[in-house]
Every structure is written in C-alpha cells, then in structure tokens.
Amino acid sequence: MPINAFHPAPGSSSVKGTAFVHIDFVLTGIVMTLLGPMLPVFSRQWLLNDTQAGYLFVAQWVSATVGMYFSAISVQRYGYRKTLMAGLALMVVGVAGLGWAHWVLGMICVCIFGVGTGVNTPAANLMTAEINPTRSAAALNLLNSSWGVGAMVCPFIVAAAVREHRTSFFLYGLAGALAALTVTFASVAFAADQKQPAHENSSSMRSSLWTLRLTLVATLFFLYVGTETAVGGWIASYARRIDPDAKSLWAIMPSFFWGTLLIGRALAPIVLRYLRATSLAKAGLTCAAFGVGILLAANSIAIVVIGAGVAGLGLASIFPINVSLLPHWFGSNTRRSSGVVFSVSNFGGAALGWLVGALSSHFGSLRIGFLVPLVGAISMLVFYLSPAASGDTAN
C-alpha cells in the first residue's frame, strides 16, 4: 500500500496513515479471532455445550453480515475514514462488554463487535484494492498479513490471561487500544475518499451471466470464511480434547494456524511475481485440504500443531486473491457486487462455525466436526479448477 494513499486531515498533524490502517487490521484480527482461544473459557463460565458455544460464531458472523451491508452504504456516503471509525467504535463497545457479561449479554456483545468487524473489514480491503489497481493481490496480502499478526498473537495473550485468571483485563485492554485508534483516525484523511468510483453498468447487473457469476463468487467467499472460522475457531477446543493434560497449551493452538497464515500472506507478494494468482490459489487450497486431513488423523498435540500449520499456510493467500479478482469478475460493478459478496461470506462463518459444533454434539466427537473445513477446502479448489475462475487480473 503506497504511503501517499493517505494525507493529514485539514488542521491535523502530519502522519503516515498507512501505518494506522495496518494497526487497525492487527486489532481487528485479534477481535475477529478471540472467540477461538476464549471459547473454552466462556463455555466453562457460562456452562455451554458445543452446540451452544457454536451459537457464538453464529452471532459474530451473522452480525458481521449486517455490518458489511452497511459498510458499502457508509463508504459511498461518508468515505473510508468515517466508516472505519464507526467500525472501531462498535468493536470498543462489544469487546469491553464481554469483560463482565453473562451468557445472554455476552451474545449481545459478540453481535456488537461482529457488526464492527463487518463494517471495518471490507472497507479497508476495497480501499487497498482501489489504490493499488496494478498490484492488488500483493497489496491485499500485505494488508491481511497485519490481520494475521493480530490473529496469531491473540491466543498467546489469552493463554497468559488464563494462567493469571485475568481474561477480563485482556478484554478491557483490547477495548482501550481500539478506542485510542478510533480517536487517532479522527486526525487522518484518506486520499482514496477523494477518488470518484467507476460508473456502474446497471444493465449488465441485471443479466443472467452476472447473476450466475455473483452466485458462484459469493459461494466461494462463503466457503472461505466458513472454512477459516471452522479451523481457527475450534482448534483450541479440539487440541484440549486430544490432550486434556496439556494445561494451557491448548489455548495457543490457534497461533500455529494463524502464524502460518501470516507467513503465507507475507510471502505471497514474492510468489506472485512468478505465479498467476489463480495458480497460487489452487496450490494453497490443495495444501489446506491436506492440513485438515492431518488434523483429522491427529492423536497428539504435536500432530495438531503440524496440521494447523499446514492448513493455515494453505489458506493464507486465498482471501486476498479472492478480493483482488473481484474487479476481473465484476468490472465496473465491483463496489455494488462486493457488498453482496462480503455479506454472504459472513454467513459462511456463522453456518460452518456452528455446524462444526452441531456435528460434534450429535456424534459425540469434535473430530467429525472437522470434516466441515475439509469439505470447504475441497469445494473451493473445485471452483478454482473450473472455467469460472479463469483469466487473472494483473498482479
């Protein structure tokens, strides 16, 4: 992302806005993934079974869908800066509330920060794609690497908080950091807000080809978010059941998944110099399916670590590549189409995250639940092997 993508607001001090957007994504990564390592804590405090715990993912992702719907409207009316500030403010309220919530209030708080992440995530991704039209896949991988940093460090922070019995301190501290960033954004203006969006072709948006393409791409995003949530959200609980004597080691299991996802996104811009984006996606999804297969066969913490790492590496570049290909798939109608695509994607997180818990409760085995992300990875691979994904944009 170029430094000149941002400039100071009138009357404000000179700052490099790029750094603040990356900080935004680090914190957003923590918020979006905190349910995974915190799930055993909430389950114990609120006396939840796996099906009930799965409803937390439903609450997060369905509410994020609402946020994504309003994100597109907010960007068009108020610009990227105010949209991101609104998303951050909602995350502050939701995360802080979890520090003292009971079961019902906890669900409400999850919904609030879910809306916030839904407002925040597509706005930052679309802005990055707009200001880097010739290298969008690489720029988006770098932006989402920052998200991966937050996702990776979150379990370590939670594990430390669990050992000290101070999980509420973690939540209050995170809320404070989000509040500070919200205030900081008030002094930063985004040059991308001054750019006029391309004219949308309303006639092409009514065509059957556009409807079919929108359905396929929305399904792709649905499967990606669902698969990522299923692995990242349940891996801590899965590890704890494989080795109940592992003390708090289970809490850092998501870090191996998010850590390799971060590494993969950091390396993707280099790989994209030699591979087409769709070729990298095919290789990544094959790797992801293999990683989930390792998790299904795991009988020790060490094997869980390997499986989580391989799955994270495989999924690393998929979301940024999906976003970078939106202009290719929808052309001048990208902004409006993306609103539908991003909204549907969050139903994937809700549906597949819940389905893992439902299958676990029904069959009495969380291992059965992990068939869900395996099917998700294979289904996405089928999409990228089909003609529907052909014809890369420039990297």
Image (cartoon, grey):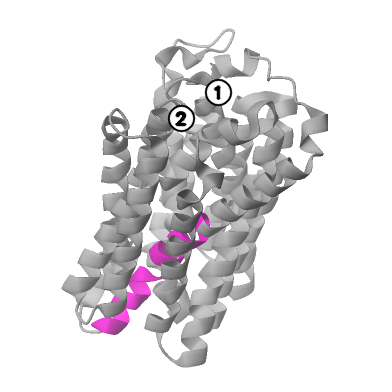
How packed mark 2 is, by other alpha carbons closer than 10 Å (few <14, some 14-19, many 20 or more), is: many
The one of 337 and 225 positioned closer to us in this rendering: 337
Which stretch appears magenta? 224-243
Q: 284 above or below 159?
A: above
Q: Tell me the quadrant of the picture where the N terminus can be found.
A: top left
Would you say the magenta stretch is mainly helix, strand or loop?
Answer: helix
Query: Looking at the image, which residue is at 39% across and 56% down?
Result: 170
Q: Mark 1 points at which residue?
A: 130
Residue 331: x %, y % from top left: 64, 28
How packed mark 1 is, by other alpha carbons closer than 10 Å (few <14, some 14-19, many 20 or more), is: some
In this picture, residue 344 sits left or right of residue 50? right
Q: Tell me the quadrant of the picture where the C terminus can be found.
A: top left
SS label for mark 2 = helix
| Mark number displayed over residue 306 | none
Q: What residue type is labelled 1?
A: Glu
In this picture, residue 246 sits left or right of residue 189? left
The quadrant holding residue 88 is top right
Q: Name the residue under label 2.
A: 21
Residue 155: x %, y % from top left: 32, 59
Q: Is residue 178 visible?
A: yes
Residue 295 is a magenta residue: no
Residue 131: x %, y % from top left: 51, 19
The one of 125 and 395 positioned closer to us in this rendering: 395
The one of 221 and 176 positioned closer to us in this rendering: 221
Query: Looking at the image, which residue is at 42% across and 32% down?
Result: 137
Q: 275 above or below 318?
A: above
The quadrant holding residue 246 is bottom left
Query: Looking at the image, which residue is at 52% across and 38% down?
Result: 323
